[in-house]
Amino acid sequence: MKVSQLSVFIENKSGRLADVTRTLADNSINIRALSIADTIDYGLLRLIVNDPVKAKSALTEAGFTVALTEVLAIEVPDKPGGLAGIIDIIAKGGVNIEYMYAFVGTSGENAIVIFRIEKVDEAISVLQSKGVRILTGNELHSL
Amino acid sequence: MYYWNKEAECVDRERLRSIQSERLLQTVRHSYEHVPAYKRKFDEIGLKPDDIQGIDDLTRIPFTVKTDFRDNYPFGMFAVPMDQIVRIHASSGTTGKSTVVGYTRGDVEMWAEMMARTLGAGGTTKGDIVQNAYGYGLFTGGLGAHYGAERIGASVIPISGGNTKRQLQIMEDFHSTVLCCTPSYALMLGESAREAHVDMSKASLRVAFLGAEPWTENMRGEIESALHIDALDIYGLSEVMGPGVSYECLEKGGLHVNEDHFIAEIIDPDTGEVLPAGSTGELVFTSLTKQALPLLRYRTRDITCIDDSKCGCGRSFVRMKRVMGRSDDMLIIRGVNVFPSQIESVLIEIEGTEPHYLIVVDREPGKMDEMEVWVEVSPELVSDAVRTLESLERRISHELHSVLGISIKVKLVEPKTIARSEGKAKRVIDRRDLNQ
């Protein structure tokens, strides 16, 4: 139900992001979604890739600090109000969203949004009770 | 020429020598009898107080070092009972424990006299209005300058440090004629005055007494032209007394050491050997009149040299050059002593930070010294949330502030990006140019 996300600590200096993407390319890793949270001195690059374990070891070997976190890949109807409906369900369930970003591909008619949620298990049961589809890592990578 | 106490400051050198000898004997006896740490040092090498017959025997006395204060924390170096101590100040120690100093009523009087000479050498009189922007508190700068100015009879504004806007307002409204602060703060005041379009050439300010941190002739030029004043260097350290140990006259050719109260020596920091006048080395002080905290051959770690030629002002006291550096790794940031070891001890307490860190000190033109601590984050610490990292930065910054007393920017860097070196790690990058 949960998907592994890589978070890479990157100092704000030129060429560092390129080092990350080059390392992933050299190891034939496909990036499926990403977002960057930035501060003055550094950024956190969050990635969903086709092989998180391999990606983590390749990046660690290249000298990066990488953390693995579990996030949810949720199907969102690709129409006005689609995202609003999902977020309402989560909000009413009393769980907080820490951050979210869009997945590049789609699942049939639906968009996919990556959610980082504090109480992830509670969120899963709330969403499933409302019939919202949550993709597994395998489902996501086979899209 | 201005003097606060011409008789003392222009004393005949022969006469000064005999005053020094007599006072040294008293100080040695007082120290030996009342401070066990001194007695031990003497006994270890079989030296008796009576072996010291005059200043020619000074070099036989063992050195005192900063760690003696730590080993005898807090009051073990005091030579009088606590009921005679009227004041306590403290400055940073190398690790954890601060360096604590005490004063009897007589010591505070003597200190005020030394600071009166200091301020008097720049022409301060009872008609002056002294804006004292040194910090008041455990730091000796604030109260040291305050008592000296009061001794002269000047009107003191105890404004303490910070709040630049209010400093300028008060300077303008109260017609301050004398400024006391750190040189970097004087630069900042000059810069702020310029930005606020205050015409300093029309202001009443005439002279500034600047110390508590290293500065340069270039900075003197900048401060003098920005504030339209004479900028004089003053020197002191809390272990020896506080500000007023030595002071510049308007000749601006080095700082006169108050030799009737302190003997200055220059030694080779590696061998401890005394060097002749004119040689560059580590400055060592012996106090001659202090009661609460007599100091025998205290190694200041400040690097300078002593000029014993006659000064144009007529004072007979020798002059030390402005401090050129340190023989240890202590940094002076905005008047506060900082040892890398203090920063290390804070970081060790915080899990998730690697023992690799770098201190970067910078001084941009017209700004105060800035210190950044770069800390490598360990893999366990990196999470997917920025706020976790931000709260780590804040926590380190807060801990450093509570230990050092100054605010320091913390910057998280990638692991293994701080250069490893063989042997002694390079912990400090000091970008301030202090040798111009």
Image: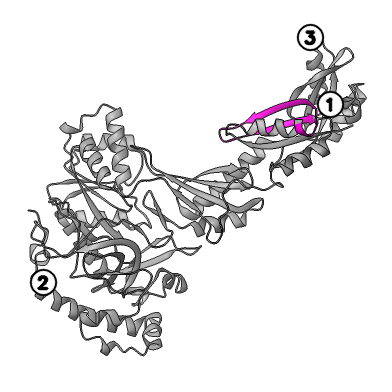
Q: Quadrant of residue B318?
A: bottom left
Identify which residue is drawn at 27% across, 58% down.
B235
State the extent of the magenta-drawn residues as a range: A26-48
Cα separation between marks 2 and 1: 87 Å
Which x, y percent locates residue B208? 21, 46
Q: Does the magenta stretch include residue A137?
A: no
Task: List the single residue furthest toward the front.
Answer: A26
Residue at the spot of label 3: A80
Chain of the residue under the numbered disc 3 shown in the image: A
Amino acid type, mark 3: Pro
Q: Mark 1 points at which residue?
A: A73
Read off the chain for label 2: B
Q: Can residue B212 be seen in this view?
A: yes
Q: Crowding near pointer 2: few (<14 within 10 Å), some, many (20+)?
A: few
Seen at 10% across and 71% down, the residue is B13
Per the image, label 2 sits on a secondary structure element best described as helix
Is B13 placed above or below B42 here?
A: above
Q: Which mark is residue B13?
A: 2
Image depth: mark 3 or mark 1 in front: 1
Give the camera-side residue of A110 and A10: A10
Magenta includes A30?
A: yes
Q: Is residue A58 left or right of residue A121?
A: left
Q: How crowded is mark 3: few (under 14 residues within 10 Å), some or many (20 or more)?
A: few
Question: To which quarter of the image does residue A3 belong?
Answer: top right
The answer for which chain carries disc 1 is A
Amino acid type shown at disc 1? Ala
Q: What label sits on residue B374 in the rendered view? A: none
Q: Is any atom of residue B159 visible in this view?
A: no
- Mark 3 vs mark 1, CA separation in Å: 19 Å
